[in-house]
Image (cartoon, helix red, strand yellow):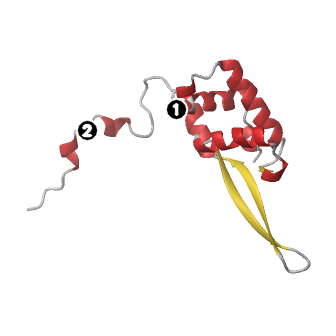
């Protein structure tokens, strides 16, 4: 699956919804989304060691925001030494949630709208 078939606009929206405290302007979010998507190209993951420090900072910021995650692969070299490769990946489920989340109007949301209306005492177990 090609990173959710994410568009620049969708990733920018997810970024803005997680980095609100920075009050990021739309253009900046789109620019960042475009930059990140360019690293992934048509791939599922990005090798960490190709990143420049400024780009790595952006990746860490998006990891903190829950948009990216890391994984590590250990490879045995021909001479027996172990080599670790660090990768960056999109957190697809989280991004999809962010994109769909606030885009939904006040219609009944699938997840927790039913539970939101319940008071705390509903959850208290009554022993008899």
The residue carrying mark 2 is 118
Residue of label 1: 101
Of the 4 image quadrants, the one containing the C terminus is bottom left
Q: What residue do we see at 68% from left, 25% from top?
A: 29
Q: Nearer the viewer, residue 21 or 128?
A: 21
Mark 2 near mark 1, Cβ–Cβ under 8 Å? no
Mark 2 / mark 1, whichever is N-terminal: 1
Of 68 and 8, the residue lying toward us: 68
Does residue 10 lie above or below 85 as drawn? above
Location of residue 10 by image quarter: top right
Q: Given the current orientation, which residue lies at the most extreme front position?
A: 53
The answer to whether 127 appears left or right of 62 in the picture is: left
Q: Determine crowd level at label 2: few under 14, some 14-19, many 20+ residues with C-alpha closer than 10 A.
A: few
Local SS, label 1: helix
Q: Is 28 situated above or below 123?
A: above
Horizontal side of 14 relative to 114 (left or right) equals right
């Amino acid at each position: 699956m090609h990173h959710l078939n994410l568009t620049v606009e969708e990733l920018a929206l997810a970024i803005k919804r997680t980095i609100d405290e920075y009050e990021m302007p739309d253009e900046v979010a789109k620019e960042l989304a475009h930059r990140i998507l360019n690293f992934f190209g048509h791939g599922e993951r990005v090798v960490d060691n190709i990143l420049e420090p400024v780009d790595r900072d952006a990746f860490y910021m998006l990891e903190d925001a829950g948009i990216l995650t890391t994984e590590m692969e250990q490879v045995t070299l021909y001479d027996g030494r172990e080599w670790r490769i660090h990768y960056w990946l999109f957190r697809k489920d989280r991004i999809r949630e962010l994109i769909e989340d606030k885009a939904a109007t006040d219609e009944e949301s699938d997840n927790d709208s039913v539970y939101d209306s319940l008071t705390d005492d509903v959850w208290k177990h009554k022993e008899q």
